């Protein structure tokens, strides 16, 4: 299934993107296929990500792993601002 997520950033897009790309192996190990990402036009501190994952339950489990929380915090993600939408085909 595919999801669209957005999150606000505290350390800017360039920093977030660098750390996000460095963590490709973590995503692959956790069955999270990154399809697209970018920032909202006119606002480099709001990132949008499209991913393919086995299920929302799987995604929630991965997002709550201490390692994933640390990765996101180091990337400057403001966790309280995150939104996630499940796409239905």
Image (cartoon, grey):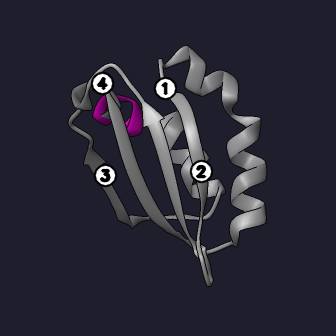
Tell me the element at label 3.
strand
Residue at 56% across, 34% down:
34
- Is 27 a magenta residue? no
Q: CA distance from mark 3 to mark 4?
A: 13 Å
- First along the sequence among labels 2 and 3: 2
Nearer to the camera, 12 or 38: 38
To which residue does mark 3 refer? Answer: 84
Q: Of the numbered discs in the image, which one, if any, rests on residue 72?
A: none
- First along the sequence among labels 4 and 1: 1
Q: CA distance from mark 2 to mark 4?
A: 20 Å
Residue 24: give x, y in percent of width and height: 68, 29
Nearer to the camera, 45 or 37: 37
Q: Are marks 3 and 4 in contact (CB under 8 Å)?
A: no
Q: What range of the chain is rendered magenta?
A: 60-65
Residue 20: give x, y in percent of width and height: 68, 45
> Which-is-in-front pick, marks 2 and 1?
2
Name the quarter where the N terminus is drawn: top left
Q: Of the numbered discs in the image, which one, if any, rests on residue 32?
A: 1
Q: Is residue 80 above or below residue 25?
A: below
In this rendering, position of residue 71 left or right of residue 62: right
Q: Residue furthest bottom?
A: 42
To which residue does mark 4 refer? Answer: 58
Residue 17: give x, y in percent of width and height: 72, 53
């Amino acid at each position: 299934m595919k999801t669209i997520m957005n999150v606000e950033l505290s350390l800017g897009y360039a920093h977030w993107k660098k750390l996000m790309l460095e963590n490709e192996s973590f995503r692959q190990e956790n069955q999270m296929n990154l399809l697209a990402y970018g920032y909202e036009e006119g606002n480099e501190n709001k990132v949008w990500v499209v991913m393919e994952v086995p299920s929302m339950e799987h995604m929630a489990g991965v997002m709550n792993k201490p390692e994933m929380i640390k990765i996101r915090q180091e990337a400057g993600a403001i966790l309280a601002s995150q939104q996630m939408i499940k796409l239905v085909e």
